[in-house]
């Protein structure tokens, strides 16, 4: 494979040929997520709950086998067969470093990652290393393995120092490796509290620092910098300050995720093919890339398919138009996500699988209590209705113009449904596996193996059709 680098607003290979990176994100593997893997709460929460039930050693066996089956050679081969030339691997720092032993690195985590990087090289697929969960948490949400809400990364130098050191260690190990397209240093940062105005001083400072630290070890690989506020905002970024940097935005369109008919109105805005293109061009990441003549990578976007069956075709149509807009403007993209239990992935665990059959009651509890509270496209549960009523009461009682009802709802949802309720459910999820043998666990976790999963016909078709049109 040819090493990639940045030349003006293009990514080029070592022959100076333009390369457009198009592919998929792999969440749920070395950074597990509740909606992807079908458990409640956070990865650290369910790992601790299972260890409490069956012991540390057996719990380690359980999760190791889960990861072994979740993403393996068959999966890489399938992604390559679609025509993708890149995978973005979501990584949790806990695989590489323990909070109990900071700055001491875990060889088992690097060995697991190495195996997949070598497989990607075998099938001609580039790898973007995405640090999806950083020390101290970069946002208050579940996808960075945050079980408590405060994003401590931005205020504690200790966590920042460990993040910098881990990136230097990753760069040391992968410098010169042409399979690695580059380093996505932090997923969906949120550099300030949702209760205060967003600031960019800290993130600008840390981006400069991490780039300098990586360059001290690895002078060649691309470094990807994501927009603030979950990949949405770049207007507060300083101008590009180093070579070989690509800027990234995340773009979850209301038309691909909210209830409604497409073309049509979603959250007060009309969407059709022209509007989808215009929304893409007005994204702050697009504006930034155009202003400074630098490459743009849409690191995440997608369409949930677990809502009303009648709405799924409209979402898929909107998704098709969204990718068309990316392609028209030669922007790089990776769709979220590759595999899950039936929410928004190209490859889905068979509903008849032993894991989903065993876990059916837990998944029902999660739906009733909306512990995956961000799925606002689903019909509201009794829990949601009551939370909204409480939010209205709190908003009216405080009676402060700067505190909106939407903000109160967001924080109630995060604090009560995503955190409190999920924490209560984690031990119940773990108890399902208590009186089983390692052989039982191994068999159940094979539900996530490629051979026991099925491509989602709509999502896989759209992605494959677009990839088939690509020349690089």
Image (tube, grey):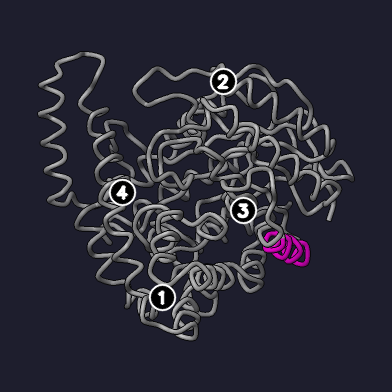
Disc 3/disc 2 C-alpha distance (Å): 26 Å
Asked whether disc 3 touches disc 2, contact meaning CB atoms under 8 Å apart, the reply is no
List the residue tagged with mark 4: 375
First reached walking from the N terminus: tag 4 or tag 1: 1
> Which of the two residues, 18 or 192, is positioned nearer the viewer here?
192
Circle 1 — which element? Answer: loop
First reached walking from the N terminus: tag 1 or tag 3: 3
Whether 203 is among the magenta residues is no
Q: Nearer the viewer, mark 3 or mark 2?
A: 2
**Mark drawn on residue 350:** 1
Circle 2 — which element? Answer: helix
List the residue tagged with mark 2: 202
Residue 122 lies in quadrant: bottom right
Q: Nearer the viewer, mark 1 or mark 3?
A: 3
In the image, residue 190 sits, relative to residue 353, either above or below, namely: above
* 10 Å crowding of disc 4: few (<14), some (14-19), many (20+): some
Measuring from the top left, give residue 27's x and y in whole percent: 52, 55
In the image, residue 120 sits, relative to residue 392, either above or below, namely: below
Kindly identify the residue that appears in the image at 57 percent across and 42 percent down.
299
In the image, residue 373 sits, relative to residue 399, either above or below, namely: below
Type of secondary structure dominating the magenta stretch: helix
**Mark drawn on residue 149:** none
Disc 4/disc 2 C-alpha distance (Å): 30 Å
Kindly identify the residue that appears in the image at 63 percent across and 20 percent down.
205
First reached walking from the N terminus: tag 4 or tag 2: 2
* 10 Å crowding of disc 1: few (<14), some (14-19), many (20+): many
**Mark drawn on residue 89:** 3
Disc 4/disc 1 C-alpha distance (Å): 21 Å
Start-end of magenta stretch: 111-123
First reached walking from the N terminus: tag 1 or tag 2: 2
């Amino acid at each position: 494979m040819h090493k990639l680098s940045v030349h003006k607003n293009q990514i080029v290979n070592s022959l100076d040929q333009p390369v457009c990176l198009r592919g998929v994100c792999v969440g749920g593997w070395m950074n597990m997520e509740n909606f992807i893997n079908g458990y409640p709460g956070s990865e650290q929460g369910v790992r601790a709950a299972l260890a409490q039930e069956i012991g540390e050693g057996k719990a380690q066996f359980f999760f190791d086998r889960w990861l072994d089956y979740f993403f393996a050679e068959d999966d890489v081969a399938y992604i390559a067969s679609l025509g993708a030339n890149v995978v973005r691997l979501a990584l949790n720092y806990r695989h590489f470093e323990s909070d109990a032993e900071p700055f001491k690195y875990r060889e088992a985590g690097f060995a697991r990652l190495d195996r997949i990087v070598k497989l990607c090289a075998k099938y001609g697929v580039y790898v973007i290393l995405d640090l999806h969960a950083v020390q101290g948490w970069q946002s208050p949400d579940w996808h960075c393995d945050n079980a408590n809400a405060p994003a401590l990364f931005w205020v504690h130098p200790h966590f920042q120092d460990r993040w910098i050191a881990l990136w230097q260690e990753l760069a040391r190990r992968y410098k010169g490796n042409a399979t690695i397209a580059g380093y996505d240093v932090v997923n969906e940062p949120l550099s300030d509290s949702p209760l205060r105005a967003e600031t960019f001083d800290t993130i600008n400072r840390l981006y400069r620092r991490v780039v300098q630290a990586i360059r001290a070890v690895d002078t060649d690989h691309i470094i990807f910098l994501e927009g603030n506020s979950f990949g949405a905002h770049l207007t507060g970024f300083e101008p590009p300050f180093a070579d070989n940097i690509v800027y990234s935005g995340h773009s979850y369109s209301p038309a691909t995720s909210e209830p409604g008919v497409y073309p049509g109105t979603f959250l007060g805005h009309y969407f059709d093919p022209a509007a989808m293109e215009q929304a893409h061009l007005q994204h702050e990441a697009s504006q930034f890339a155009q202003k400074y003549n630098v490459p743009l990578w849409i690191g995440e976007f997608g369409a949930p398919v677990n809502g009303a069956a009648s709405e799924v075709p409209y979402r898929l149509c909107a998704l098709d138009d969204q990718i068309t807009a990316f392609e028209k403007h030669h922007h790089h993209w990776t769709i979220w996500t590759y595999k899950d239990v039936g929410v928004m992935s190209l490859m889905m665990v068979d509903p008849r699988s032993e894991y989903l059959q065993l876990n059916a009651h837990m998944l029902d509890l999660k739906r009733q209590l909306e512990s995956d509270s961000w799925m606002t496209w689903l019909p509201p549960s009794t829990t949601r209705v009551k939370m909204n009523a409480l939010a209205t009461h709190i908003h009216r009682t405080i009676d402060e113009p700067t505190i909106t009802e939407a903000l109160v709802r967001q924080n109630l949802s995060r604090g009560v449904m995503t955190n409190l309720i999920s924490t209560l459910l984690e031990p119940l999820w773990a108890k399902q596996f208590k009186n089983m043998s390692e052989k039982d666990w191994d068999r159940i976790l094979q539900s996530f193996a490629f051979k026991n999963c099925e491509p989602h016909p709509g999502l896989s078709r759209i992605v494959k059709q677009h990839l088939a049109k690509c020349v690089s």
